Image: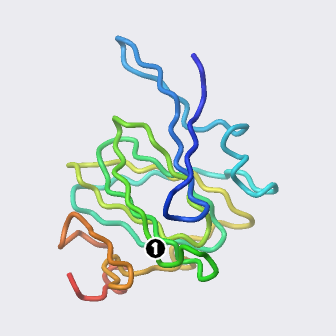
Amino acid sequence: MKMDFDFRSSNLLEDVTIIYPSVHKEDRGSIWTSYLNKKIDKFLPDDLVFLHDKFSESKKNVLRGIHGDHKSWKLISCISGKIFQVIVDLRKSSSSFLKHETFRLNSNEKKMILIPPGMGNAFLTISENATYHYKLAYKGDYIDAADQFTVAWDDPRLNIDWPIKKPILSSRDLQINNGSN
């Protein structure tokens, strides 16, 4: 079984990489590799490695984000279910500042996205349930919610065409809400 990846650069966002792993399918099901340091770490700065993984389980219509920080690289994927993924460039020095790209990620199509620091990350669960996977690389201690930036999911500057008008939001995301939902 070959462990390989197809790497594609985003057409809209600077430094975002979409990764398609090779999938071996047979009558029993399928098997694939989600991470191989020699293949994927080449996209990280030389002195950085992935340090930990997180999973988020969400029910239908839960919208998580738009969150991020200025030091973490995130390799994200949908392990089960279906999600509507949004990545927003919030790096003021970037040529794609305030631009966003959307993806539909699901457990049937194996796709991962490598998101650099300074990008806002958000997703909406569009199936009954979904499990979202984050693989994180950063220097020093992990930056959790209190030290991250948050942008309203419905910020009019971003003009994101969400497939829902009234998502289920966390108190964190409700506090930053623009009120246009």
**How many neighbours does mark 1 have within 10 angstroms: few (below 14), some (14-19), or many (20 or more)?**
some
Q: Number of callouts in the render? A: 1
Query: Which residue shows up at 50% across the image and 38% down it?
Result: 20
Locate residue 46, reporting x and y percent: 81, 54
In the depicted view, which residue is nearer to us: 148 or 159?
159
Residue 37 point in image, percent of width and height: 70, 39
Looking at the picture, the colour scheme in use is rainbow
* Place of residue 5 in the rendered image (x, y in percent of width and height, measured from the top left): 58, 34
Q: Residue furthest top?
A: 27
> Against 144, is 30 above or below?
above
The residue type indicated by label 1 comes to Lys
Query: Which residue shows up at 57% across the image and 16% down it?
Result: 1
Q: Please give the residue where the numbered disc 1 appears in the rendered image.
A: 99
**Image quarter hosting the C terminus:** bottom left
Instruction: Give the quarter of the image for residue 163.
Output: bottom left
Residue 151 in percent (x, y) is at: 42, 80
**Rendered view: 10 above or below 165:** above
Residue at figure coordinates x 53%, y 71% from the top left: 68
- Side of 31 where 61 appears, left or right: left
* In the foreground, 124 or 113: 113
4, above or below 167, in the image: above
Q: Secondary structure at mark 1?
A: loop
Q: Quadrant of residue 6?
A: top right
Residue nearest the observer in this picture, 151 or 21: 21
Above/below status of 75 relative to 116: above
Task: Report whether 26 appears left or right of 97.
Answer: left
Q: Residue at x 34, y 51 (%)?
A: 104
